[in-house]
Amino acid sequence: MRYLMMMLSIWSISAVAQSQKSAVWPAGKKMALSLTFDDGRGSQVQSGLKLLNQYGAKATFYVMPNAIEKTVSLWRELVKSGHEIGNHTSLHPCSGNFAWSRTKALEEYSLEKMAKELGESNRQISEMLGVVPESFAYPCGQTFVGNNEKTQSYVPLVYRQFSSGRGWRDEAPNDPAYLNMAQLTGMEMDGKEFEDILPLIQDAAKQGYWLILAGHEMGASGNQTTRLAMLEKLIQYAQKPENGIWLAPVKDVTHHLKAK
C-alpha cells in the first residue's frame, strides 16, 4: 500500500510539472521548435526558401554581411516572407586550432574587438536588409576570446546586445524553466534523416522543451547540408495539430518566454 501511494505521488508530481511546462507554450502546444540556418549561404535563398515558403514555415537565418551581399535581393525577399535575420558576426571567428581560422582566431580577439565586430555586422545587415538582428549565433559554438590566462567569455556581451545567443552541436533542447537566453542550445540537423530528428522532437514534446535545430547548406547532399527531403517531412510533422508543436523563429519564442 505504501509503495502504491509513493508511485501515485511521483506520478502526480510528474503530471503537475508537465502541465506547468505545457502552459508555457501557446494554447494546445506541447513544445516549441525553431529551424535555424547559419552563415548566410547561397543555397538557403536559392533552394531552401522555396520549400519553407511552400509550407508557410518561418525560420531564423544567422548571416554575415559579406556572405549575403552578392544575393542581397534574394535575402530581401526572404525578409519580406517573414523569416528572421540574426547576426553571425562579420568574419566568423573561431579558435585558431582550425587552420582556416588562423587569421581571425578568437584567441587574438578582445572583448572590445568582438563588441565592435558585432555592432558593425548589425549596422551592415540593417543597411542591406532593413532589419536590425535581435538574435545571435556563436560561430563554431565557441563563446570565448583571448588565450590562456587572458581567456574571457563574450556571453555577457551577447546578452547585452541581443535578445538571445545560440550554440552549436549541443546535446539537449532548452528547458523553459531553466533558461540562459545568451546560451541557448542548438542541435545539429545537417546530414540527418527525419528518422534521426524525430526522437529529438518527441522527447522535447514529452518534456515541454524548446528544440532549436541548426543547419547550414540547404540541398539534397553535401558537407554541412540540411537535406530538403528531411526538412519537408519535419515541417509536415510539425504542422499536424495533433503533434502539438509550435514552429516559430527564435525571436518569436524568445519574446514569448520573456513575456511569460
Image (cartoon, helix red, strand yellow):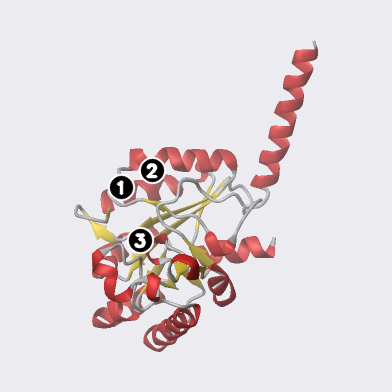
Q: Could you tell whether 33 is left or right of 52 in the image?
A: right
**Disc 2 or disc 1, which is closer to the eye?**
2
Inter-mark Cα distance, 3 to 2: 18 Å
What's the CA distance linking mark 1 and mark 3?
12 Å
Contact, CB < 8 Å: mark 2 with mark 1?
yes
x and y percentages locating residue 92 in the rendered image: 34, 72
Res 120 → quadrant: bottom left
In the structure shown, which secondary structural element does the residue marked by tag 2 occupy? helix
SS at circle 3: helix
Can you identify the residue that label 3 sits on?
52
Label drawn at residue 230 = 1
Mark 1, other Cα within 10 Å: few <14 / some 14–19 / many ≥20: many
Mark 1 / mark 3, whichever is N-terminal = 3
For disc 2, the marked residue is 197
Q: Is residue 199 above or below residue 170?
A: above
Q: Residue at x 35, y 50 (%)?
A: 189
Q: Considering the image in quadrants, where does the C terminus appear?
A: bottom right
**N-terminal-most mark, 2 or 1:** 2
Q: Could you tell me the amino acid type at mark 1?
A: Met
